[in-house]
Image (spheres, rainbow, N blue to C red):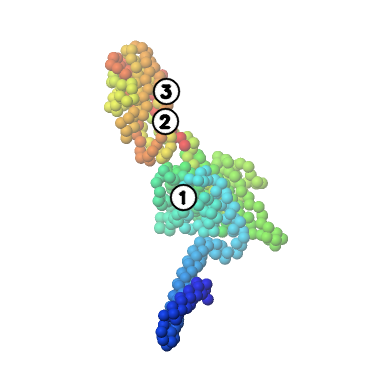
Amino acid sequence: MAPDTALSKRHIITAALARLAQYARTAVRPGIIRYLARRVLEESRLRLHKIAATSQEIVARVHEDLRQLLQNLVTRAHEKSASLIRLCRLENPDSMLVASNQLAKLVAKQVRMKQKPIDIAVINTVEDYAVAAGIAALPRLARRIFQVADPTESGSRRDFSVAIPRDHTASEASTLIMYATPDFLSLWDRAEEDLDRFLVERLQVILVIVQPRFRPLDFASHSYLLSLLLSAFPTKKFDTSLEVYIAPESSTASESGVTRLTRVLRANGWRSLKESCVAICGRLLGESPKRFSALVISVKRLPERIIAHVDYQALGSTNAIIPPRIGVAKRSDGVSVLGPGFSPRIGSRVQVRLKINGFLTWRNEFVVAVWRSDSLDVLSLVKRYARAGQRVFIDHKFEFKANTMSRIDLDLRIGLSQSGGTVFVNGDPYGQDHSLPVPFLEIRELN
């Protein structure tokens, strides 16, 4: 009997004896005492039965709740270990586990910012065991996992773009890890275009090209993959590094379960890869690899890249006025000479350099100002004083941060700080001087 039930029984018996004692003191006839005793005992028996029934009901309910809880735990464990169950059905699960863990460490090592949001996109043709260890190797709070349907299964074999689901704002994104197979890569004609689009919102994209079951693939018989990689990752646009992974072979009887060391060959020289399709430059272990089980390709924006450059080659002149103070100058002041546009990566620093000359016919200040099309405030304003008949040269740099992915148009305008005389660009009142340096406006994106 449970302790609570025994305690309740003692309380009932104690109460019954107390009532019997009270009846014994007050009763006049002996028969009444026996009647009251039987009645108290009957009531006690009914209460005990009721308590026992309630206890059985509580025990049954707790038992059912525990059974349901255990069932849910078993179901969740089965769902989460589905990839492991499939792995255990393979012929050599030990080598598969070793290869998965080693590839996971190699991928995690390439991640530049591990504590920032990491999106993991898995093309559904990639086997689960090749991805599970890689996911586990990353911080849980930073990762988001997406299952992406293979675009080649929709009918268009090459003319497709990879779409990554988004459930967050672009400013939160940092790294995208994408698992795919060599067959998928060979059909991805828009790889450069998609990577360029991914890197607008992210700092790094890591492509993990995994051969099914880590079977080694010969470079010689699949040279088209290297040609595709060279065309999809131009060095003028991307900062690219390549890791070649060769999985350990299955253990033989003489090895007694000891597997061979993994050969991870680092490719620090993408240019050397272009010169030789099978030679990976860098610190190699032995000969250049002739096979691979997986390729890990890290793609980032170049630390600095030119995104716009425009020249002004005409002869220009104006006597319009631009007040030489930032709070006073308006977008309509002066004369527009250059107006480049560009689409930056969100969060990047944009550096603008302008170089221009001005010949003044009267003592005055040559003023150059730059505005953005989406703002009334001047981005930058610079002035140079000159005497009558003197030429001045301006070489000026300034920076601003891009907080949008929308196109930004700049407007470079020239003028004088006050009325009096005229300013000429690329010449003087007698005509154009082709010996002068060509004025230009150059825009660079800095990471």
114 or 291, nearer to the observer: 114
Q: Is residue 362 above or below residue 118?
A: above
Q: Which mark is residue 395?
A: 3
Coordinates of residue 396 in the picture (x, y in percent): 41, 24
Give the residue drawn at x 66%, y 54%: 260
Q: Is residue 141 visible?
A: yes
Q: Which residue is mark 1?
A: 119
Quadrant hosting residue 89:
bottom right
Question: As drawn, is 251 to the left or to the right of 207?
Answer: right
- Label 3–label 2 contact, CB within 8 A: no
Quadrant hosting residue 322:
top left
| Local SS, label 1 | strand
Q: Is residue 405 above or below residue 159?
A: above
Q: Amino acid at mark 3?
A: Asp
Coordinates of residue 168 in the picture (x, y in percent): 40, 48
N-terminal of the two: label 1 or label 2?
Answer: 1
| Local SS, label 3 | strand
Tell us which disc is closer to us: 3 or 2. Answer: 2
Measured in 3D between alpha carbons, the distance from the residue under mark 3 to the one under mark 2, in whole angstroms, is 14 Å
Q: Is residue 387 above or below residue 292?
A: above
Give the residue drawn at x 55%, y 64%: 85
Give the residue drawn at x 42%, y 23%: 395
Q: Amino acid at mark 1?
A: Asp
Question: As drawn, is 260 to the left or to the right of 411?
Answer: right
N-terminal of the two: label 1 or label 3?
Answer: 1
| Local SS, label 2 | strand
Q: Amino acid at mark 2?
A: Glu
Mark 2 neighbour class, 10 Å CA radius: few under 14, some 14 to 19, many 20 or more: some
Tell us which disc is closer to us: 1 or 3. Answer: 1
111 or 235, nearer to the observer: 111
Q: Is residue 95 above or below residue 68?
A: above
Q: Which residue is mark 2?
A: 399
